[in-house]
Image: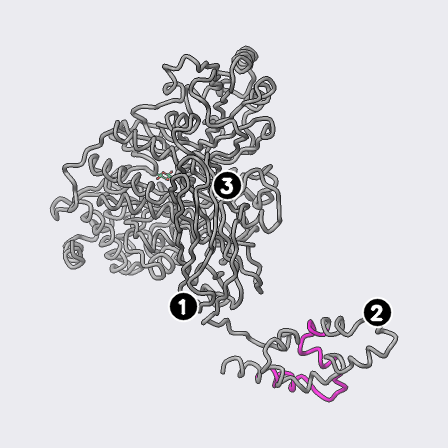
């Protein structure tokens, strides 16, 4: 519908109708205004399947929803590093929504994995904003290609479940820009999600729902977002303020009381009616966009989509360790051990919980194979070793040629609504793994979890397969990997630290009551572990294959560019093994030298490439200013410091195969403001400034006394270089106290400062 037509409809609405349009009719619908032909529009969770509630609504997945298909959760889909696959998954979800009359699916969820403890990490993508944003963008693209909207969430800085409705995320602007906003930015700019969902929490003292800076200045004015912003369920706290900040739709609703506040505020003149009109227009625009593009032919073919879920899961399973034990032979005696072989943990609890129409377990897949035995090994109702189950499992393992233990985190360990209190797996499972490994040298552990776990048995087993929360078809996909029908190709979108205490947010997570300080700044995930040169359990970007890849010929179309230009980076990848496989080629950028404190390197590109044995392909990346820039709080903009950068290409963040130096020149400038406190060292960085302060330079303390120092007894303790270095830290005003001998006064120094500032502005 044209903007003009929408305006016309808005102009025909009464004040009450407009206010009431800004909140839900019920848990899942916007309001209809029949006399104007405005239909109700349904939204549903999200993000990895359809949680459409026909009956009673709730936001925590407590009540039944329709039978649907559960795809791998965000933790897994991000690990695929496969944009096309995520697009296809999106298309499938979009088709399902069309068939079910759902206008907007509530996702993807891109919140950064700041700590392994966040209960909702399983829904989120990564510790890295580029990965999160690219994964989200691909999913959005796919869903919206079917004329169904998305709601990228939870905007902003919602990185824990504890006190999520009242906590205040205290974050510096640079970390917000480089990490937390960046996870949304690329996807919003490129893929234009129809809606954005704001989070419950505060950001630096202001609720996300009433945050004009982020909902309007950043999201709309800077990024060009044109859809509507809806609240997370119950995130509205001050309706009129929220509307003014840019929050259009309150979900679900306040039973009409907030609508009345809007009406009153317009009547009293507190709220300009045009603010309300704009919000209503944005909501109607999306309502009609869906309505006018309804696909009446769409079908929700659950069995077909189950196969799609298996296909996605095949690429979301990360092979963490393999000492020659995988793939397994289909004819060997194998013991499948662990409850999750029979009833896999494949999704997390809360609003994303799908009522799966069917579930395929690993045991279902091997049903006809008489060489595969099963022993339950543990129960996950409580963390207690069942000696009988343990003994049976050890016995089954002893008799077999290989044992596969299906372990992981029980539902009670991670969910929306609360955080984990530690990073351990249940003790009973750790014990089981250790005991099985004692009797069976060919032990493989398959993990079902949404967030990193500590692995005390890491050196005792030969294989580790991270299946994440792989969706309802996970059992099939795991068997495809175990038996080598599919070559694993996923990579970790997050670091697995050795222990929780290593995580950069450890000291401050989950805050003091409602105050949550993000003191680690930009050093989230590998940005921190790399800077600290820390050993980790498995690094960001890690994931093995049944084949090997050789990297060669890293090249660029230019070795130097201005930051207004772009640079093409190419590298050749060859499959040097015997089986076909896919490699995730990762491109990191490192600033060689910087005046600001920056991570050692940051991911700025990735491509997944499929190669037959012996085949070589060239992978091409394009880098622009943002790949080299940091966010300067001073100029409130992205800034590249002129100089050398390393382009690092590799198979993981800790497996860099090739490096190439390039140079980038800044076209921007961060103005330097001189004061009497400016140090001599900083002044002398500009050769033109040296001219201005040359009189000062002749003074003793700034080098004039160099000879004297050298000839005096002090020269034994203070070298000329030391003197110069110390003088470099001397503020300009220091000339009064040291060496001025009354020849200059403060007015002279101020005069110099003015001259220097005039020079800087010229
Ligand atoms: C969650 C959202 C979800 C909404 C509706 C909230 O509690 O945070 O992610 O979309 O409920 O179920």
Residue 38's x, y, as percent?
Answer: 16, 46
Residue for point 69% across, 71% down = 729
Residue 273's x, y, as percent?
Answer: 25, 59
Q: Secondary structure at mark 3?
A: loop
Could you say which disc has been placed on residue 260 in the image?
none
Quick check: 310 above or below 132?
above
- 729 inside magenta stretch: yes
Q: Which residue is mark 3?
A: 542
- For the residues carrying marks 1 and 2, which lies nearer the camera in this image? 1
- Residue interval drawn in magenta: 727-754
- For the residues carrying marks 3 and 1, which lies nearer the camera in this image? 3
User: Which comes sooner in the sequence, label 1 or label 2?
Assistant: 1
User: Which comes sooner in the sequence, label 3 or label 1?
Assistant: 3
Q: Secondary structure at mark 1?
A: loop
Q: How is the image coloured?
A: one colour
User: Which of the 4 quarters of the picture holds residue 245?
Assistant: bottom left
Residue 347's x, y, as percent?
Answer: 40, 30
Q: Residues within 10 Å of mark 2 (few under 14, many from 20)?
A: few
Could you say which disc has been placed on residue 717 in the image?
2
Left or right, residue 67 beside residue 232: left
């Amino acid at each position: 519908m044209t903007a003009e037509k929408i305006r016309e409809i808005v102009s025909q609405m009464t004040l009450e109708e407009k206010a009431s349009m800004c909140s839900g009719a019920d848990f899942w619908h916007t309001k209809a205004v029949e006399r104007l032909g405005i239909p109700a529009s349904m939204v549903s969770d999200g993000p990895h399947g359809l949680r459409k509630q026909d009956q009673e609504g709730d936001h925590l997945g407590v009540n039944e929803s329709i039978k649907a298909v559960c795809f791998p959760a965000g933790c897994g889909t991000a690990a695929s590093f496969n944009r096309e696959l995520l697009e296809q998954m999106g298309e499938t979800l979009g088709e399902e929504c069309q068939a079910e009359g759902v206008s907007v699916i509530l996702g993807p969820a891109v919140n950064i994995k700041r700590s392994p403890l966040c209960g909702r990490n399983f829904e989120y993508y990564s510790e890295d904003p580029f990965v999160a944003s690219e994964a989200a963008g691909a999913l959005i693209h796919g869903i919206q290609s079917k004329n169904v909207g998305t709601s990228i969430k939870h905007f902003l800085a919602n990185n824990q479940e504890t006190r999520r409705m009242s906590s205040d995320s205290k974050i510096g602007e640079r970390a917000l820009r480089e990490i937390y906003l960046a996870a949304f930015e690329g996807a919003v700019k490129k893929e234009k999600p129809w809606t954005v969902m704001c989070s419950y929490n505060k950001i630096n003292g202001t609720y996300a729902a009433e945050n004009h800076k982020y909902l309007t200045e950043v999201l709309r004015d800077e990024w060009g977002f044109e859809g509507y912003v809806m609240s997370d369920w119950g995130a509205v706290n001050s309706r009129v303020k929220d509307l003014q900040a840019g929050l259009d739709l309150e979900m679900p609703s306040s039973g009409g009381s907030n609508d009345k506040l809007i009406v009153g505020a317009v009547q009293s003149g507190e709220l300009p009616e045009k603010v309300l009109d704009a919000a209503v227009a944005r909501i109607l625009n999306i309502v009609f966009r869906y309505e006018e593009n309804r696909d009446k032919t769409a079908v929700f073919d659950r069995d077909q989509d189950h196969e799609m879920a298996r296909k996605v899961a095949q690429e979301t399973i990360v092979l963490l360790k393999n000492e020659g034990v995988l793939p397994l032979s289909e004819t060997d005696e194998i013991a499948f051990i662990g409850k999750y072989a029979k009833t896999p943990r494949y999704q997390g609890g809360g609003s994303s919980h799908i009522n799966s129409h069917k579930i395929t377990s690993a045991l279902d897949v091997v049903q006809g194979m008489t060489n595969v035995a099963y022993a339950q090994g543990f129960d996950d109702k409580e963390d207690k070793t069942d000696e009988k189950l343990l003994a049976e499992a050890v016995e089954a393992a002893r008799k077999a040629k290989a044992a596969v233990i299906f372990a992981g985190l029980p539902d009670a360990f991670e969910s929306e609504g609360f955080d984990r209190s530690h990073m351990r797996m249940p003790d009973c499972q750790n014990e089981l793994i250790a005991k099985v490994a004692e009797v069976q040298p060919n032990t493989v552990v398959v993990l079902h979890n949404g967030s990193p776990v500590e692995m005390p048995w890491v050196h005792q087993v030969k294989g580790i397969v991270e299946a994440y929360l792989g969706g309802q078809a996970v059992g099939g996909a795991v068997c495809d990997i175990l038996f080598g029908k599919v070559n694993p190709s996923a990579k970790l979108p997050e670091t697995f630290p050795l222990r929780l205490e290593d995580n950069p947010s450890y000291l401050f997570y989950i805050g003091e009551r409602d105050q949550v300080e993000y003191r680690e700044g930009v050093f989230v995930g590998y940005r921190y572990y790399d800077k600290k040169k820390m050993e980790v359990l498995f690094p960001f970007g890690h994931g093995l294959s049944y084949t090997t890849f050789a990297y060669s010929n890293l090249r660029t179309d230019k070795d130097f560019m201005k930051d207004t230009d772009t640079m093409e980076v190419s590298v050749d990848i060859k499959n040097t093994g015997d089986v076909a496989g896919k490699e995730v080629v990762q491109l990191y950028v490192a600033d060689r030298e910087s005046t600001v404190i920056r991570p050692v390197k940051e991911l700025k590109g990735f491509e997944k490439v499929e190669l037959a044995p012996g085949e070589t392909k060239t992978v091409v990346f394009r880098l622009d200013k943002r790949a080299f820039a940091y966010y300067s709080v001073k100029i409130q903009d992205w800034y590249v410091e002129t100089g050398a950068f390393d382009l690092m290409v590799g198979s993981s963040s800790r497996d860099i195969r090739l490096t190439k130096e390039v140079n980038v020149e800044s076209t921007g400038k961060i103005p330097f403001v001189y004061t009497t406190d400016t140090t001599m060292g900083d002044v002398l960085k500009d050769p033109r400034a040296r001219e201005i302060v040359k009189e000062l330079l002749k003074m003793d303390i700034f080098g004039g006394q160099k000879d004297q120092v050298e000839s005096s007894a002090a020269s034994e303790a203070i070298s000329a270089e030391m003197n110069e270095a110390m003088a470099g830290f001397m503020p300009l005003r220091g000339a009064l106290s040291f060496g001025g001998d009354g020849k200059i006064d403060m007015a002279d120094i101020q005069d110099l400062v003015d001259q220097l500032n005039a020079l800087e502005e010229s």
